[in-house]
Image (cartoon, grey):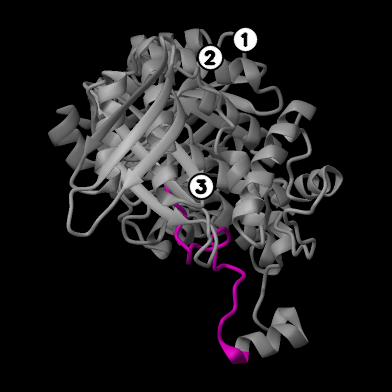
Amino acid sequence: MRKIYVFDTTLRDGEQSPGVNLNTQEKVEIALQLEKLGVDRIEAGFPAASPGDLAAVNAVARAVKNASVMGLARSVEKDIDAVFEALKGAADPAIHIFIATSPIHRKHKLRMEKEQVLETAQRAIRYAKKYFSRIEFSAEDAGRTELDFLCEVTALAVREGVSVVNIPDTVGYMNPQEFGNIFKTLKENVPGIENIQLSAHCHDDLGMATANALAAILNGADQVEGTINGIGERAGNTALEEVALALATRADYFQAQTTLNLKEIAKTSRLVSKLTGMVVPGNKAIVGANAFAHESGIHQDGVLKEKTTYEIISPETIGLKDSKLVLGKHSGRHAFREKLIDLGFDNLTEEQVNAAFGKFKDLADRKKDVSNEDIIALLEEKMIETPEVFALEQLVVSFDSHATPTARIRLKTQKGIVETQSEGNGSVDAIYRAIDALTGEEVVLDDYTIKSVTDGTDALGDVHVVLKQGDVSAQGRGVSTDILEASARAYVDALNRLVDKRNAPPRSRRDRDNVTLV
């Protein structure tokens, strides 16, 4: 079958999701998992945005060996220079250059005529060729660009020797028939089009990103661009897992396939959700919690008799397990290690296994049955190691419906053990006021999210917070059967990350204001 290349922009367009700010270590961890997933090309960031972004892209470039690592650049020399600097040490570097082409962008954003757009694109491609043998060129807002001008722009890029021409539906305006027709038209009218790859980059503003990407493939696209879980600007991007499973499940229709390792999809989805703080909706296709759940009696009866009556994809396809091994407080280390391997955590060190086993035993004492989701949450709570400036030693909360809640907090700091008590509008507010008093950090709680990892009154609570301090923001996560303890742990985790970020190069989004392509 025809191979469809996978271009992942989770680290660039995905990070442009409101409230998402990945540090270098988190970017590298996601990139290495994308490498295990088998993506062909990883867009690691926008190096010209700041020294911090450049350094993060460079760290990804040096870590990844089996995928091409790319950096985004506007059609200006300084952006191209920044990508060249960021990709030093990459095993397979490439650059992604773009310029807007639609009438509305030409008039209101670029203030350029068509001829100026063509000249700017040509100069940028020629300049980039000094550094890179592989160049991807994108006509931003191609979906709203006149077809004849889009053919002209594409023909220019082909003549100048780019490897890939990307056709973005930047604002999610297209429908599948329209978008597919663009690729058909380019294939039929651009000289030399057979010498390059055509790529589709779709946004989900009208809920048609995956449908549009598949329409592009049916009409000749060689590459699809998107993100894990479909995260990204505004309503997000094409969800790569949806395209990959659509091609695999309906191979008879599309006659095309990716070379992704589909069994890594569930793990990759969880990692991206954890590090970005963006919860995957339960009804999300492929990776949502309900994707393989059946509540209707009719459905349950059908699935028990024959799974394919209501499941067109098996959970095992994306790396989920239907495990019957029950773990509890009497379980031993050997059974626990086997469970970790079964869940895909087969590369942990002995020290990491021992630490996880200790956390598991603590949890098993609190609840009767420990589920797979509980174990995954425990393992993922602190997969990213941050220097521990503050550590929660003890939490005591007093609540009375007729009195003001109070919280007594004991923290371990670099100066020793400190303790204080504070009141608040609620128990969580009291906890956070006490922590602020002990740490001396003036922060704003920008986001607070709590969800249940599993069902039942003894379920693990998973708390995600975002703290802001001036222009710096950091995410924190805490997991516990007690939501107040989880809230405290998440807050302390975020403070540690905030302090760590203050000591790192600043990461500015100033130059990202003009980057709406991904």
**Rendered image: mark on residue 89:** 1
Q: Earlier in the sequence, mark 3 or mark 2?
A: 2
Element under disc 1: loop
The residue pinned by badge 2 equals 58
Residue 234 vs residue 225, the one in the foreground: 234
Q: Is residue 293 magenta?
A: yes
Q: Is residue 296 magenta?
A: yes
Local SS, label 2: helix
Mark 3 residue crowding within 10 angstroms, few (<14) / some (14–19) / many (20+): many
Residue at numbered disc 3: 480
Q: Do the CB atoms of the residues marked 1 and 3 lie less than 8 Å apart? A: no
Quick check: 450 above or below 104?
Answer: below
Q: Is residue 282 left or right of residue 256?
A: left
Please name the amino acid that badge 2 sits on: Asn
Q: Earlier in the sequence, mark 1 or mark 3?
A: 1
| Residue at 59% from the left image edge and 32% from the top image edge | 383
Name the residue nearer the viewer: 138 or 12: 12
Q: Quadrant of the N terminus?
A: bottom right
Q: Residue 221, position in %: x, y?
A: 55, 48
Given contact means CB atoms under 8 Å apart, are the residues at marks 2 and 1 in contact?
A: yes
| Residue at 24 percent of width and 47 percent of height | 405
Which residue occupies the foreground of this view, 86 or 398? 398
Residue at image point 52% right, 9% down? 131
Measured as percent of width and height from the top left, residue 147 is found at 33, 48
Magenta-drawn segment? 278-298
> Is residue 508 toward the left or the right of residue 54 in the image?
left
Counting residues from the start of the chain, the first of labels 2 and 1 encountered is 2
Three-letter residue code for mark 3: Ser
| Quadrant in which the C terminus is drawn | top left
Q: Secondary structure at mark 3?
A: strand
How far apart in space, not on screen, are marks 2 and 1 (Cα)?
8 Å
Left or right of 296? Residue 463 is left
